[in-house]
Image (spheres, helix red, strand yellow):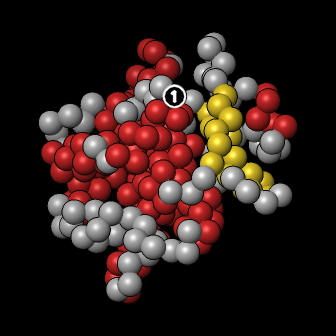
């Protein structure tokens, strides 16, 4: 049975499409557009999952949410392979760490930057604090990528897919071009992957590509 991806435009679910293309697993896409005034997900997504969020996948009667959980589920479905945890213990630990770090630590300051940016003059008092907070994470990621080609080690893995959305958001919201060359190089390399481009073709326009 093919996997159904409930895909919200310009969202974390782009990573799920990309992973499926990398793994070569069959899937179909049900696409949702954001409300043009609020930029929130449409109410139709609540019919799939009570929280009304994306990504959500359906497979063999299961409704699965949360990007990291979906990634681990799909990796297991594909019997591991090169996108799963590296065989060495340090690489495996980094793989697990960056799966958690992407949403647990890196994404919150990116969301704060988005909210502050939409507040106009009312957000100015907090802007410098939020930017400094976010850039602490960006500096950390820049240093990590300067030590190895990919987040878990010398080879591309699902950890890189997981890290893509917050770093794409960071480039857009914090204007990183030229300031963090290692991150920009990494983004250039992931965007050049055939599976990434195939996911864009199936998922529709994506503001962060």
Q: Is residue 53 above or below residue 95?
A: above
For the point 20% across and 34% down, which residue is it?
A: 177
Graded by Cα atoms within 10 Å as few (under 14), some (14 to 19) or many (20 or more), the crowding at tag 1 reads some
For the point 31% across and 36% down, which residue is it?
A: 171
For the point 76% across and 35% down, which residue is it?
A: 45
Residue 18 spot, x, y in % from top left: 47, 48
| Position of residue 105 in the picture relative to residue 42 (left or right) | left
Nearer-the-camera pick, 26 or 96: 26
Q: Where, quadrant-wise, is the N terminus in this rendering?
A: bottom right
* Res. 40 image quadrant: top right
* Res. 91 image quadrant: bottom left
For the point 83% across and 58% down, which residue is it?
A: 61
Q: Where, quadrant-wise, is the C terminus in this rendering?
A: top left
Q: Which residue is mark 1?
A: 204
Q: Is residue 116 above or below residue 122?
A: below
| Position of residue 149 in the picture relative to residue 162 (left or right) | left
Residue 186 spot, x, y in % from top left: 25, 50
Nearer-the-camera pick, 75 or 107: 75
Let me know if residue 78 appears in the view. Answer: yes
Residue 134 spot, x, y in % from top left: 36, 44
Nearer-the-camera pick, 138 or 129: 138
Let me know if residue 162 appears in the view. Answer: no
Q: Is residue 44 above or below residue 20?
A: above
Number of dots carrying numbers: 1
| Position of residue 27 in the picture relative to residue 205 (left or right) | right
Residue 200 spot, x, y in % from top left: 45, 35
Element type at mark 1 = loop
């Amino acid at each position: 049975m093919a996997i159904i991806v409930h895909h919200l435009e310009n969202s974390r679910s782009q990573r799920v499409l990309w992973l499926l293309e990398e793994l070569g697993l069959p899937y179909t896409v049900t696409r949702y557009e954001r409300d043009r005034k609020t930029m929130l997900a449409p109410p139709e997504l609540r019919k799939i999952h009570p929280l009304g969020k994306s990504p959500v996948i359906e497979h063999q009667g299961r409704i699965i949410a949360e990007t990291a959980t979906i990634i681990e589920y799909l990796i297991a479905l594909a019997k591991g392979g090169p996108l799963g945890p590296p065989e060495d213990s340090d690489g495996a630990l980094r793989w697990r760490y960056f799966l958690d770090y992407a949403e647990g630590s890196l994404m919150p300051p990116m969301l704060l930057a988005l909210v502050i940016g939409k507040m106009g003059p009312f957000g100015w008092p907090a802007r410098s604090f939020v930017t400094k907070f976010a850039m602490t994470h960006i500096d950390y990621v820049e240093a990590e990528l300067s030590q190895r080609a990919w987040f878990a080690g010398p080879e591309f893995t699902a950890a890189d897919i997981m890290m893509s959305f917050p770093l794409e958001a960071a480039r857009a919201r914090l204007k990183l071009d030229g300031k963090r060359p290692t991150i920009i190089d990494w983004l250039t390399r992931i965007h050049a992957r055939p599976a990434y481009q195939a996911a864009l073709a199936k998922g529709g326009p994506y503001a962060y590509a």
